[in-house]
Image (tube, grey):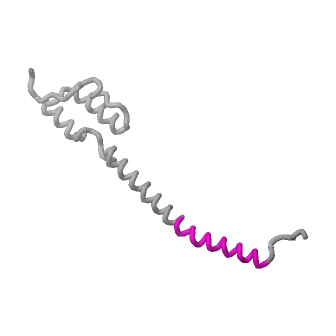
Amino acid sequence: MISAGPSIPQLATASDAGGRLAAETLPWLGVLAGVLVVLWLAALWIKRRVAGGTESNSGGFDPEALERLRRDGSLTDEQYRAISRSMARRAAGLEDDATRLGVQASDGRDD
């Protein structure tokens, strides 16, 4: 004889099994989502630590200190301009021209 489909008790049993499966699976999916969020935050923290965070990469000089060095005679006008451009490029994330070209601040002595 051909069956017309599952009987009512069979449907109830299948529904209960699906409900149990969902009840057992959902907490683990929540734990997995939590672990993924923690890993993502850890990756961001490590990336900031390795990349130096949001601190300026100006080598410890701020524009005022650089201007003082120029006024004191520790830097020539050419060196001042090169370092200023370098600081601006670093702030913008571009290549450091002063380092690439080998321009360095003098130590204040005339050789």
The furthest residue to the top? 111
Task: Tell me: residue 30, above or below residue 101.
Answer: below
**Left or right of residue 47: residue 15:** right
Q: Nearer the viewer, residue 32 or 66?
A: 32
Q: What number of labels is visible?
A: 0
Give x and y (percent) for residue 59: 24, 38
- Give the percent coordinates (x, y) of residue 31: 49, 65
Q: Residue furthest right?
A: 1
* Residue 79 in picture, x, y percent from top left: 22, 27
Of the pair 41 and 18, the residue shown nearer to us = 18
Query: Which of the image's four quarters has the C terminus?
Result: top left
Please check the rendered image and state whether residue 54 is part of the magenta-colored stretch, yes or no. no
- Which residue is more in the foreground, 8 or 102? 8
The N terminus sits in image quarter: bottom right
Is residue 26 inside the magenta stretch?
Answer: yes
What secondary structure prevails in the magenta region? helix
Please name the residue shown 33% across and 47% down the image: 53
For the point 47% across and 58% down, the residue is 36
Give the magenta-colored segment's residue range.
8-28
The part of the image, by quadrant, that contains residue 41 is bottom left
Q: Quadrant of residue 64?
A: top left
Check the image and name the residue furthest to the front: 1
Above-or-below relation of 61 to 20: above
On the picture, is 70 further left or further right than 51? Answer: left
Q: Residue at x 50, y 62 (%)?
A: 32
State the residue at coordinates (37%, 33%).
94
Measured along the vertical axis of the image, is residue 110 above or below residue 84? above
